[in-house]
Image (spheres, rainbow, N blue to C red):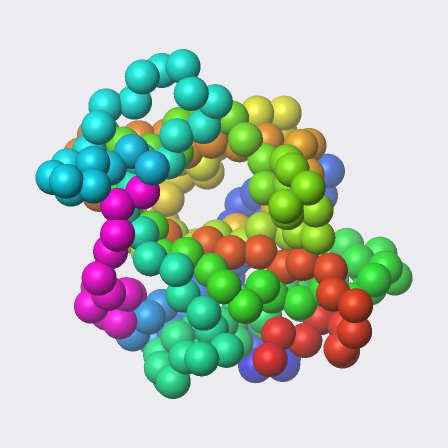
Amino acid sequence: MTGDMIKEHEINKQDDLFIKGYYAPDDVIDPAIAWANTLELQGGSTLSSSTGELVKWDGNTHAHKECVETDILWPTLEVPEMNNLLGWVQFALDQYIGSYPMLKEGGAFKMDPGFNYQVYPKGHAYNGWHSERASIDCTERMLVWMIYLNNCEDGGETAFLYQKFKCKPEKGLLLFWPSDFTHTHRGMPSFKTEKKIFTGWFSFVNGGEILAWD
């Protein structure tokens, strides 16, 4: 995809936020969405194991993920639609690095082998402010990637606390942001639309080609 044009989000004009957005072409995102719609989803931390119904968030938990989801391991995928999408994510990452070339001066990092497909029912979200590198279990995470798989008629934004920025879900919009506390964020509920996303990370590794994901 080298040399191809890429449509960018308005946020890309602000270099000081370190959040960038890129729009996947329909011929990349639509087949991936169609494949995702065939997946069997499991209840998250707010789902009752006996009934499969959502349990109301108590308002006290630091971060409650009110979704159904499935984990995907891309090295074992034999799904051309998804391999095409992940290749495009890497292409978009190259554009992000072009904005912040110092990323090439540090240690090697690659796309994590696992990522998530998440579906948030109407009125539910990832409640509570959180970051993606908040414990010893995830210290190697460097960047977050997330791509919206549908538009939300209302709400559904990803809200960034310190940047004072809320990103509206748009089908095919891919976001990158740093994993640290500086980019503490939360999901906002949409009361009219089910919200669907893919999300994963790029993490530091001990070896391998810098920036290679495959």
Check the image and report above or below for 43 versus 166: below
* Residue 29 figure quarter: bottom left
Magenta range: 33-44
Question: What x and y, as percent, mark residue 76?
Answer: 45, 80
- Horizontal side of 168 relative to 111 (left or right) equals left
* Residue 10 figure quarter: top right
Residue sitting at x 62%, y 74%: 213
Q: For this rendering, which residue is in front, 80 or 56?
A: 56
Q: Is residue 17 visible from the viewing direction of this image? A: no
Question: What x and y, as percent, mark residue 163?
Answer: 62, 29
Residue sitting at x 45%, y 36%: 158
Check the image and name the residue furthest to the left: 51
Residue sitting at x 11%, y 39%: 51
Quadrant in which the C terminus appears: bottom right
- Horizontal side of 115 relative to 5 (left or right) equals left
Check the image and name the residue furthest to the front: 50
Question: What x and y, as percent, mark residue 160?
Answer: 55, 31
Q: Is residue 64 visible from the viewing direction of this image? A: yes
Q: How many marks?
A: 0
* Residue 93 figure quarter: bottom right
Q: For this rendering, which residue is in front, 103 or 60?
A: 60
Check the image and report above or below for 164 versus 89: above
Does residue 31 belong to the magenta stretch? no
Check the image and report above or below for 29 versus 49: below
- Horizontal side of 136 relative to 78 (left or right) equals right
